[in-house]
Image: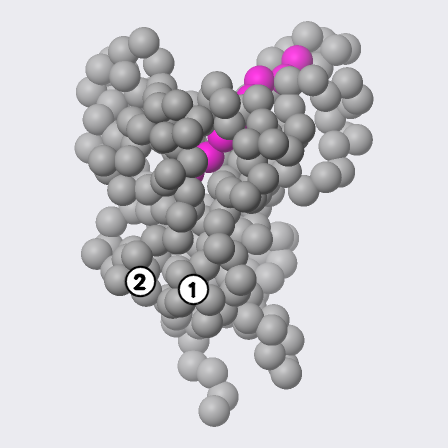
Amino acid sequence: MCGRYSSDLRWEDFAKLYDLSKQGPRPAWNFAPSYNVCPTDRVPVIVANDDGRQLAVMRWGLVPNWWSKPLKDMRMSTFNARAETVAEKPLFRDAFRRSRCLLPASGYYEWLETADGKQPYYFSRRDGQPLTFAGVYDTWHERATNQPIESCAMVITEPNNFAAEVHDRMPVILEKPDFDPWMNGTPEEAAMLMKPAPEDVLVKRAVSKRVNSSRTAKDDPTLIDEVSLAA
């Protein structure tokens, strides 16, 4: 599972990579850098609209539209959706059929089980560009207030050989030509994209175990600095 990632992206990064020129004037807000994005955090998401694409903010951890209990009772892990079951699992199938999205990131973390405990590794693009994860989203209305809450999940798949050195899953990583087929294509076309990234896309490095805690300060850029491991 991918339960943490980092996001140090500016409006210029979003606008260029996702062709957001039709969205209108630059938004009045910006996302503060976060080097420890955790489930239930509010995160930037790219969705399709009538003019092309739009930048939105959503809860990371999908709440399906049919959920009938209070949000606090949503205790299932819905921040990741497995590629093998996303089209059939009740939690995600409606979102996969009609509302797929893109999750921008600077990099993501996975953990390797070692004799000294779980060692985190940070994965990022070899070319230094942002990562784009395949995602699905839904809109849920809380009954007490009827307020809409938009939420999303990251789609994960089996790892390539490079990622498998650390973990048995990896996010579905999309390239720019994949964006429209993922968001606007048929479910069958989207399913063709749910595969491991090529072996040469990512680099990885061991990082501090401080990222193991969700309470670690999110604005600490040293979380992604490489650390030396004992031989």
Q: Main secondary structure of the magenta part?
A: strand
- Residue 55 visible in this rendered orientation of the protein: no
Q: Count the numbered circles shown.
A: 2
Asked whether disc 1 touches disc 2, contact meaning CB atoms under 8 Å apart, the reply is no
Query: Which residue position is annotated with label 1?
Result: 163
Q: Does 136 appear in magenta?
A: yes
Q: Position of residue 131 (x, y in %)?
A: 33, 46
How far apart are the two marked residues, 1 and 2, measured between alpha carbons? 8 Å
Secondary structure category for the residue under label 1:
helix
The residue depicted at 64 percent of the width and 18 percent of the height is 65
Compared with 229, 209 (above or below) is above
The spot of residue 195 in percent (x, y) is 40, 48
The secondary element bearing badge 2 is classed as loop
What's the residue at 65%, 30% (across, down)?
91
Question: Relative to the observer, which residue lies in front, 125 or 91?
Answer: 91
Q: Which residue is pictured at 33% across the width and 42% down the height?
A: 174
Q: Residues within 10 Å of mark 2 (few under 14, many from 20)?
A: few
Q: Earlier in the sequence, mark 1 or mark 2?
A: 1
Q: Position of residue 14 (x, y in %)?
A: 28, 33
Local crowd size for mark 1, using a 10 Å CA cut-off: few (<14), some (14–19), many (≥20): many
Q: Residue at coordinates 38% horizontally, 67% vertically from top-left?
A: 162
**Closest to the observer, 222 or 109:** 109
**Among the 4 quarters of the image, the one containing residue 28:** top left
Say which quarter of the image contains residue 12. Answer: top left
**Three-letter code, disc 2:** Glu
Tell me if residue 230 is in the magenta stretch.
no
Residue type at tag 1: Ala
The answer to whether residue 12 is above or below residue 111 is above
Q: Is residue 118 left or right of residue 219?
A: right
Q: Is residue 41 left or right of residue 26?
A: right
Please give the range of residues in magenta.
133-141
Name the residue carrying label 2: 199
